[in-house]
Image: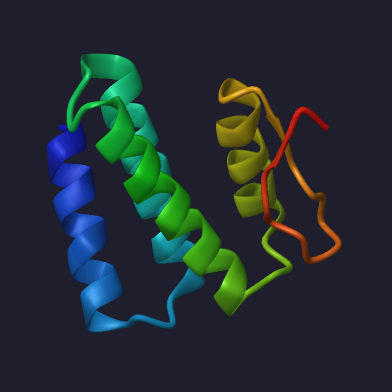
Amino acid sequence: MLDTAVTEFQKATALDPSFAEAWTALGNAYSSAFAVSGRYGYDSARSEAMNALQRSLALNPDLAGTHAELAARLLLDGLEYGGCTGGTEARPGA
């Protein structure tokens, strides 16, 4: 089921690369697929999720859910989120 979600959100972002919410959903799908079944491997799933979430925020920095998901991903990695002030860079040890 999660593989289908990843595939469908990949299609959505290919059809409309400016659809920020689809990028958020793709990032969530990658994160969930790894968390639930270990799909895609940790490094790949994390990288794909982070790229999709950051792409979403580049398109629409006002998406609160995307900020929350990105912050959760960084928290799991022991990193701090730059906040909703436009910063999405990770700050190790901060």
In the rendered image, the vertical position of residue 44 relative to residue 19, given as above or below: above
As drawn, is 93 to the left or to the right of 45? right
- Image spot of residue 74 (x, y percent): 61, 34
Left or right, 27 with reference to 83: left
Q: Looking at the image, is 15 positioned above or below residue 61?
A: below
- Seen in the image, is 51 located left or right of residue 67? left
Q: Residue lying furthest front in this view?
A: 93
- Residue 68 rendering spot, x and y as whole percentages: 68, 42
The quadrant of the picture occupied by the N terminus is top left
Along the viewing direction, whichever of 79 and 19 lies nearer the viewer: 79
Measuring from the top left, give residue 5's x and y in whole percent: 22, 45
- Residue 92 vs residue 58: left or right? right
Residue 85, by quadrant, is bottom right
Residue 29 rendering spot, x and y as whole percentages: 33, 41
> For residue 79, what is the image quadrant?
top right
Viewport quadrant of the C terminus: top right
Q: Is residue 90 placed above or below 11 in the rendered structure?
A: above
| Image quarter of residue 46 | top left
Q: Could you tell me which residue is drawn at 67 percent across and 45 percent down?
A: 90
- How many numbered callouts? 0
> Residue at point 57% right, 22% down?
76
Q: Nearer the viewer, residue 39 or 2?
A: 39
Name the colour scheme: rainbow
Q: Nearer the viewer, residue 69 or 46?
A: 46
- Tell me what residue is drawn at x 68 percent, y 53 percent: 89
Residue at 38 percent across and 34 percent down: it is 31
Q: Is residue 14 above or below residue 42?
A: below
